Image (tube, coloured by chain):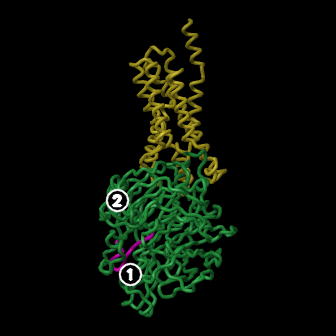
């Protein structure tokens, strides 16, 4: 139902959104790697004044098993205030939650009680295949033409993956987004520069190359994704492809500057075939085209092969495996998850071409198994993975699972889920909140975190 | 002599002109009709001149949208009697209101933040046409053109009247659009949108319904 005034969680600009009230709850996708019990969206209390702080206080189970919940998003966000296609009287109310493996899409109502959300609609994979010809649903963004959902494959599990649209009131599948996809085949993440009418998409691989774990031959043959694609957001037309080259594999999470006047952003590359390093690249405008530059390289760490899983044994080193990154609302700090080594690194990216490291913590990690002050078990596994920043930039939350089948390749003894929180200093610097550690129930593993009212990867803005 | 007196009375009857001006103010103040886009472009390009320049294509697009609707109706009015014309307009307007009530505002977004002045004029034309801005003026314009429901519109007198109607409406729309843009730029910041942006879509739909009803009963 339309409201009389805009949803209070909509902000015209990132500058204003950074002054939003603190979040009190977080929604976290949790999946059962054995696909025996239903996956769930868990509600975590993140209000430090609450008696149930750092506890799971609610949960909504999916109606089926084996969905593999992964990323999810809101039905509406601050982009509803954009002047060219305004629809400011929609509520930010529903979580749009896809199953990456099942291709099923769940619409979850967070009202009237945000701590006990409930499922109001389930869209079957067959309907999505029929209307959009896609499967393996991945990332959700609310934007100018409704809800954008990307998919890693077509209905039969082959390339091309792409994007389709959902109506943000009825949640009906509106159809494929692309009108001219050019050379684009693989899909992973997508986001945009509303101020520059540009969509950006990245690449992973087709389902047969990841649903049973990463395939070494595909990786060593540089057959996983390594390109960025730039699109005209409104014409829905492919404009430009940038190939990172054979050395670079798995070009994943896209974090454009929040300020709509800026035309740059950051993307993480998981692994270099040359030396197992991970890297962060900045994309930017140059001479009427988009260009990229590697701005951070995180080296692999030499390690005793006895401590390494079979996939890494031959290399005598642990790869950093940068699998997620996130940019603060003021475009100042970039957080980089190193799922392999266990580091969470904070960079000052005020100059997007010259990042400076301003903070680092270590937790878990393939070799280090670093612990947390509140963890009862002294050796944590998994590593920093999906990371989310509060709108004011003061708090950072992250979880430790990547993807069921890949977790067991890098953490073969099993992965016990956890969620932690960092406090951020006024001028950078990060440290663990010693009172926040969610020892995740063993039946499930946590993945993406979404914060009440929006966070640093949920909203986009039209005004500086 | 008696005819002259009646005509004079009609001329001095100000309500259609007032309603054209009032609707101009209503269209002008609605953020979806242009001032917000102008302000956004000015902020985005860090140039306040862009705000004022943008108002011109926005006004031109709005004026064109209204003129097209009036031209179509005046043209039909020369061959169809006023009563039928009003009923036809009412059906269109109520149909549009029904569409907005049930389907909201679903449409492709074709014009974005990098648009030029021509794109802005097209955007404004599409926005005004799609939302029935011209149709909303029908009771006033038809009232000005002719009072006798059984006759057809006399082309000679209706053209200047229609042009005057568009001119008045668009002048008021432009002044109000500029005033709101100025107020936002000078005295407020866009944070005011968070509380002051009331649901114009709802008011707009109700205004369409009221217009349709007026055409049927008046």
The reply, left or right, for residue A381 in relation to residue A126 is right
Task: Please report, as a chain letter, where disc 1 is located.
Answer: A
The reply, left or right, for residue A154 in relation to residue B125 is left
Q: Does residue B117 sit above or below A211 in this rendering?
A: above
Q: Colour of chain A?
A: green
* The magenta stretch spans residue A245: yes
The quadrant holding residue A19 is bottom right
Q: Does residue B59 sit above or below B81 in this rendering?
A: below
Task: Please report, as a chain letter, where disc 2 is located.
Answer: A
Q: Residues within 10 Å of mark 2 (few under 14, many from 20)?
A: many
Please give the label number shown on residue A134.
2
* The magenta stretch spans residue B138: no
Q: Does residue B104 sit above or below A364 in this rendering?
A: above
Query: In front: mark 1 or mark 2?
Result: 2
Q: Position of residue B159 (x, y in %)?
A: 45, 24
Please give the label number shown on residue B195.
none
Magenta region, main secondary structure:
strand
Query: From this viewpoint, which residue is outermost toward the top?
Result: B1
Chain yellow in the figure, letter:
B
Q: Nearer the viewer, residue B189 or A404?
A: A404
For label 1, the residue is A272
The reply, left or right, for residue A15 in relation to residue A171 is right
The structure residue drawn at horizontal position 34% and vertical position 56%, both measured from the top left corner, is A129
User: For the magenta stretch, what is the residue range?
Assistant: A243-253
Secondary structure category for the residue under label 2: strand
The reply, left or right, for residue A433 in relation to residue A319 is right
Q: Position of residue B194 (x, y in %)?
A: 62, 51
The answer to whether any part of residue B168 appears in the image is yes
Q: Position of residue A149 (x, y in %)?
A: 42, 59
Query: From this viewpoint, which residue is outermost toward the front?
Result: A36
């Amino acid at each position: 139902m339309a409201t009389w005034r805009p949803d209070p969680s909509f902000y015209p600009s990132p500058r204003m959104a950074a002054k939003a009230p603190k979040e009190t709850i977080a929604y976290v996708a949790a999946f059962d790697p054995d696909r025996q019990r239903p996956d769930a969206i868990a509600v975590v209390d993140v209000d430090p004044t609450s008696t149930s702080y750092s506890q799971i206080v609610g949960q909504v189970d999916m109606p089926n098993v084996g969905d593999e919940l992964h990323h999810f998003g809101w039905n509406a966000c601050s982009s509803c205030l954009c002047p060219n296609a305004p629809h400011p009287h929609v509520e930010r109310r529903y979580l749009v939650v896809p199953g990456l493996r099942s291709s099923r899409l769940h619409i979850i109502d967070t009202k009237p009680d945000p701590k006990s959300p409930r499922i109001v609609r389930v869209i079957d994979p067959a309907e999505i295949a029929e209307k959009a010809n896609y499967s393996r649903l991945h990332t959700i963004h609310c934007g100018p033409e409704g809800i954008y959902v990307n998919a890693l494959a077509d209905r039969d599990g082959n390339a091309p993956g792409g994007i389709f649209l959902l109506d943000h009131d009825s949640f009906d599948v509106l159809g494929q987004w692309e009108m001219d996809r050019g050379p684009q085949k693989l899909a992973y993440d997508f986001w945009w520069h509303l101020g520059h009418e540009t969509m950006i998409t990245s690449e992973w691989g087709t389902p047969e190359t990841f649903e049973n774990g990463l395939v070494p031959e595909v990786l060593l043959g540089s057959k996983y994704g390594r390109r960025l694609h730039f699109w005209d957001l409104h014409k829905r037309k492919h404009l430009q492809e940038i190939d990172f080259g054979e050395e670079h594999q798995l070009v994943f999470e896209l974090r454009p500057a929040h300020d709509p006047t800026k035309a740059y952003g950051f993307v993480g590359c998981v692994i270099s075939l040359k030396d197992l390093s991970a890297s962060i690249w900045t994309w930017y405008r140059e001479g009427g085209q988009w260009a990229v530059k590697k701005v951070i390289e995180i080296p692999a760490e030499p390690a005793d092969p006895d401590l390494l899983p079979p996939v890494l044994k031959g290399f005598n080193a642990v790869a950093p495996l940068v699998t997620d990154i996130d940019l603060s609302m003021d475009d100042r700090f970039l957080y980089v998850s190193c799922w392999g080594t266990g580091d969470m690194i904070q960079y000052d990216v005020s100059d997007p071409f010259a990042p400076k490291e301003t903070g680092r913590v270590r937790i878990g990690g393939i070799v280090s198994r670093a612990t947390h002050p509140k963890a009862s078990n002294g050796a944590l596994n998994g590593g920093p993975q999906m990371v989310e920043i509060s709108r004011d930039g003061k708090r950072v939350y992250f979880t430790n699972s990547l993807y069921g089948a890949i977790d067991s390749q890098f953490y073969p003894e099993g992965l016990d889920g956890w969620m932690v929180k960092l406090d951020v200093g006024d001028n950078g610097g990060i440290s663990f909140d010693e009172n926040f550690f969610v020892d995740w129930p063993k039946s499930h593993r946590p993945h993406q975190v979404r914060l009440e009212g929006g966070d640093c990867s949920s909203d986009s803005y039209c005004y500086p | 002599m008696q005819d002259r007196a009646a005509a004079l009375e009609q001329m001095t009857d100000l309500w259609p002109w007032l309603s054209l001006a009032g609707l101009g103010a209503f269209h002008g103040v609605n953020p979806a009709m242009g001032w917000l886009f102008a302000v956004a472009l000015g902020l985005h390009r860090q140039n306040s001149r862009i705000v004022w320049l943008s108002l011109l294509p926005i006004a031109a697009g709005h004026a064109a949208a209204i003129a097209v609707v009036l031209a179509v109706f005046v043209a039909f009015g020369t061959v169809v009697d006023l009563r039928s014309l009003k009923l036809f307009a009412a059906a269109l307007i109520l149909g549009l209101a029904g569409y907005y009530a049930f389907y909201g505002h679903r449409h492709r977004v074709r014009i974005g933040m990098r648009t030029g002045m021509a794109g802005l004029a097209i955007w404004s034309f599409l926005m005004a046409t799609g939302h029935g801005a011209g149709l909303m003026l029908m009771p006033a314009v038809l009232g000005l053109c002719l009072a006798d429901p059984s006759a057809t519109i006399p082309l000679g007198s209706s053209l200047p009247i229609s042009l005057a109607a568009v001119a008045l409406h668009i002048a008021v729309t432009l002044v109000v659009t500029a005033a709101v843009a100025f107020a936002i730029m000078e005295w407020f910041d866009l944070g005011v949108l968070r509380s002051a942006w009331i649901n114009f879509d709802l008011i707009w739909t109700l205004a369409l319904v009221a217009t349709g009803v007026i055409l049927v009963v008046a």
